[in-house]
Amino acid sequence: MTKQKQDSLAKTEKNGGQIIKVDADFGEVYFKVQNGNIMRPVKSKMNLMQSLGHLYYVSKKYNITSDGYKHLNKVASISMVNPQSVIVDGKEQSNPYIERHERTKITKAVYIRKIGIGYSPAGNITIIDKTLHYNLYTYFIQSIQAKMNKKKWESGKQTDEAEYPNCAELGVKDKEPIKKGKWVWYEMEEPLGIWANYEDPAIIACLEEHTQKQRFADRIAQTIVERNILKDHPAIGISQIKPSNKTSPQDQKAEALVTVYGYRNDFNAPKINEILARAERGDETLEIKEEIIKNIEPEEEEAEAKKVIEDEKDIEKQDFELTQEQEEGEEDK
């Protein structure tokens, strides 16, 4: 540590030791020093930035993305593990369990269970056990409904005029819309459903997005469940924030400081496996919070799915370019 860094330390006497603040690149980190030794971190103030994909804005609120939680977890140090099994319709299945269409083998749904293991602010091991049923059909219907409900904006204000007036209609199966278009029926709650016009650009976009989600459904489900574990773990325990700077959602420049608690630990693989085994046995000495995630906001699913799809496409592009370079190198020999 440089003398400049040493001079920048803020020290406060507390419980016979000292609390030392270090200004790191990612925020403010507080350490406890006792008898000249740095103890486990007390807390950290982490900076979240919308421009880096840490935040998204919806329904007049700023929410933290999975990337934002991964950033906060640099201090919280919550370990993610995969149990061997997940319960599907009352039966134990391998985890994750992917439900596929009988004929096409396309992914219809993903059942996934993950466990987050980490310390609470009080220093107790806390386990968050979550199971998610990611039903692709449900979110496809919701994406069509979002297009149906979208309104036009004029002069910076939302109007009552539909952005896509001919994309879809709510109705019943035996009454196809009589207006121009090519219509396909999607059932919701019998007898109601949606007639979608698959000639309309908005529905074409929904279908293309749905195809991408089918390709990467397991990754999307994993991202969503991990985000919810980090959101609920007491080391982080926050989902919405208020920006610390003055900005507008259109600027994509919102920033916020979030306090995170963490402890350096010796959670190596054997230790993690031991805690996981105890958790699955229902060890009462551990603080365990279990939940089956029943409702994911469409905006959350949309934000996380979009990020996963973009990341996967980037990886595929890099792999393709690498393969091309290797093939060209072989030809030059």
Image (cartoon, rainbow, N blue to C red):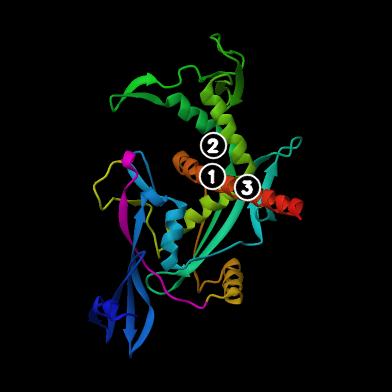
Q: Would you name the residue on which mark 3 appears?
A: 316
How far apart are labels 3 and 2 at the CA level?
25 Å
As displayed, is residue 125 above or below residue 243? below
Residue 207 part of the magenta segment? no
Q: Would you name the residue on which mark 2 appears?
A: 139
Please tell me which residue is depicted at 29% across the width and 50% down the height of the picture.
242
What type is the residue that disc 3 sits on? Glu
Please tell me which residue is depicted at 33% across the width and 89% down the height of the picture.
36
Q: Quadrant of residue 149?
A: top left
Compare residues 24 and 200 and report the one nearer the observer: 24
Q: Would you name the residue on which mark 1 appears?
A: 310
Q: Quadrant of residue 4?
A: bottom left
What type is the residue that disc 2 sits on? Tyr
- Residue 72: x and y, percent? 41, 61
How far apart are labels 3 and 1 at the CA level?
10 Å
Q: Which residues are magenta?
A: 249-266
Q: Report the quarter where the C terminus lies.
A: bottom right
